[in-house]
Image: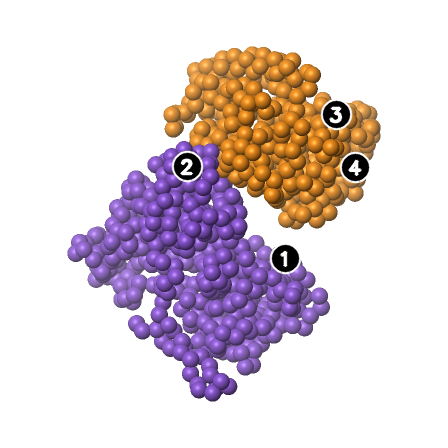
Chain colours: A purple, B orange
Amino acid sequence: MSSDMRVVIVGASLAGLRAADELRRLGFDGPLTIVGDEPYEPYDRPPLSKAVLLGIMPPEHATLPARTDLDAKWRLGVPATALDLEDNRVVLGDGDSVPFDKVLLTTGVRARPWPKPEESDLDGVFTVRTLDDSRRLDERLSAGPGHVLVIGAGFTGSEIASVCRERGLSVTVTERGPAPLVGALGGVVAAVAADMQRDHGVDLRCGITVARLEGDGQGRLRRAHLSDGTALDVDVAVVAQGSIRNTEWLAGSGLAAGPRGVACDAGCRAFDLNGLVTDNVFVAGDIARQPHPLYDYQLIALEHWGNAIGQAEVAAHNMIHEGLHRRPHLDIPAFWSSQFEVNIKSVGIPTYSDQVVVSQGSVEERRFVAAYGFRGRLTAAVAFNHGRWLDFYRGLIESAAAFPPDFAVMDRTDPWEVRSSELPDPAILSHGPTVSVTGHLPTERHVEFVSAPK
Amino acid sequence: MSRAQLLERITDQSNRANPYPLYEELRETPAALQDNGSYLVGRYYDVAALLHDPRISSDLHNRRAGMPGADRADNGGPAFIRLDPPEHDRLRRLTTRQFGPPHMPGRVDSMRGELADLVSTLVDNLEGKDRIDLVDDFAYPFPVSVICRLLGVPREEEPRFHVWADALVASIEPTRDSDSDAKMKAAQQAQMEMGMFMAGLIEERRKNPGDDMLSGLAADHHDGGLDTLELVTNSIMLFIAGHETTVNLITNGMLTLLRNPDELDRLKRHPELMPLAVEELLRFEPPVHLVPQRTPIVDVEVGGVTVPKGSPIVLALASANRDPERFTAPDRFVPDRADNQHLGLGSGIHSCFGAPLARLEGQMALNELIRRLPNPRLVEDPPPYRPNPVLRGPRHLMVDCG
């Protein structure tokens, strides 16, 4: 496929690299530029909160393999600062700009920092998102800190707490919600995660936030003050309060880009602010907000490893195919985590549910499958040390099977107990409006961004 | 009517050398009801789905009375290959603790040196011969020695194990014939004798533990540990599964390479391709062709066909592996095939326990054979096959060298 088409990929991580790989695999031989704000070659992030932090995997082993004939121009260590869709160029932080015919946006997310800079600057306060973050925290954990505080018990926070316990470190976890992982898995399954943490010696404090981090006067972290008025002496605090999508640089580009991501169609083509689909701007990975037919076509952004790969491949394909030859991204979302000797796997979207039932195995033994349903339809399944069954549930989700499941399975004889999944109604918007429509004549009407109220 | 007889034709020895046209016929229907009440399934996506289906049991107690295999439910003791969760999971987990990660991450890898020595000694013995039987001279003795060392069975006992293993394997069959009762009796006898021997060996390992798997299993009290019956039954199962399959992998592998001399030549020049080539062999000529002992515990639907609760389901892995809906040019041997998610080692909770060892054995054996055998040529094609349609492979593979 001889081509003069210039492709630029902004974001040199899993999605960006995978898309580049796929473009070449599909025979695209035109000029390809990959822009990344970090100085490193693309690397894999799942080990950063697991094996690397345990000290059993050298950080450099996280580098992602790439095909040898990628033949790309790399612009690493420099962020993209703007996308100019009038001139079709990506503006870089060093003042340079890169012209394109087609561009793929894969800038991902960053760790949400501790909100008070004077506290987050203290020596001993960490976030974990990048290779450097993980390397630094590994060094600190290896030095044997007296007490570690993990702020936030989502997947990253819980995995880090697990690593700390495996390293024999004493650790407190604070979680604003009623249990770890509650935002992703709902209250019923999250209660199991809470037991898991406590059984492994984590000092887990739910319904608690950290009010203030206190230094020792020399710039080192000394103490954390909690919302219940108590204080803890800590040497290390890991801030694991979720992430922020790297979309600020797209402000002014005219794309439907904001804090929730960049809206796109099922073929990864970005929408502009007016809701018109573009034909030369593609988006993949953590920032892509994509409609999924099985989830009522809602625009959903997923920070999953497999999602980044699936979208990257579809985006690459659609960059070099037209019309009916384009492909939709219709994978069933899936993710995994490993913590406290349990391998957690999920298919579907557990937050898209109103009910849950333990469909296989035993919660007591922490080997089970929980099936999630929304308005009578199976929408997700989560396995604790039972992941080999999930392909079956993937099939049920794809075929819009009824919920609760009404069949016998081998490893369950108790009657099914269907409970509320203890998640917010997915039909309710989690964010307020961020745009307004202006203009009066049909030819004038267009959409503008409004800042979300703080 | 001929479709109803498909299982019989697949089982018929005269079709052993090339059952693939029958599988092609099988794939015309999603689930083919046979005269004996079994349902034969051979399309990739159906087989894969059934391997992951929690309504499909591996325990013959779930067969309806009168169905093939129902009378064998109590044979052979609690081997995890014939059990369902949660019992299956507990036994497999305890066994895995002595075999692989996370508790024994180095078990297979640490055997590389031994494996290389075994392979090279066996090939040394072939040197200077004009004609060899690849099965008797190499493909059988190699994995038997490996599994004996892994489990901790003394080498001098190997011949007795050989006899027992033959009797046990002969009784694995998806259909009954006039010899079935005799084969069953012989298998029960072998199981008993082998069990007595294993029990003695386990007692011995309890007193004088070594670094072998039996010693580890006998000493492990995690989760309540394995009781003696569980230990004996499962170690016999590992012994059988640990070599009867690998023999076929190596023999089918050499046969396939000798039939594809250009590919043999390429692998000789690029031994680093062998791991991929072994995956392709597992797809193209899998050591296990059929999984005969699955039973749905409720009515299940397979491609629009309802399979009633309690009916035998026979999963044709070798057919799924050649399904053109899943693999491009499925009847071609492509050693560096991309996207090769074959079912040669099964899938789901019963996927091959010994897979990492089998792969390594296959890779090392084939690399050494093609590196050192001078100008190997098939004496007869097809070679004579073992009678077993489940564990399918040549009984002999005569090769001329020099």
The residue sitting at the left extreme is A229
Query: Disc 3 designates what residue?
Result: B13
What type is the residue that disc 3 sits on? Gln
Tags 1 and 2 both on a single chain: yes
Above or below B219: residue A412: below
Give the distance between the C-alpha atoms of the residues marked 2 and 4, in whole angstroms: 48 Å
Any mark on residue A361, and which?
Answer: 2
Tags 1 and 3 both on a single chain: no
Q: Badge 3: few (under 14), some or many (20 or more) residues near its Cα, within 10 Å? A: some
- Count of all numbered marks drawn on residues in the image: 4
- In the image: residue A206, left or right of residue B196: left
Q: Nearer the viewer, mark 3 or mark 4?
A: 3
What type is the residue that disc 2 sits on? Gly
Q: Badge 4: few (under 14), some or many (20 or more) residues near its Cα, within 10 Å? A: some
Q: Chain of mark 3?
A: B
Query: Disc 1 designates what residue?
Result: A68
Residue depicted at 44% across the width and 54% down the height: A349
Say which element carries label 3. helix
Q: Chain of mark 1?
A: A
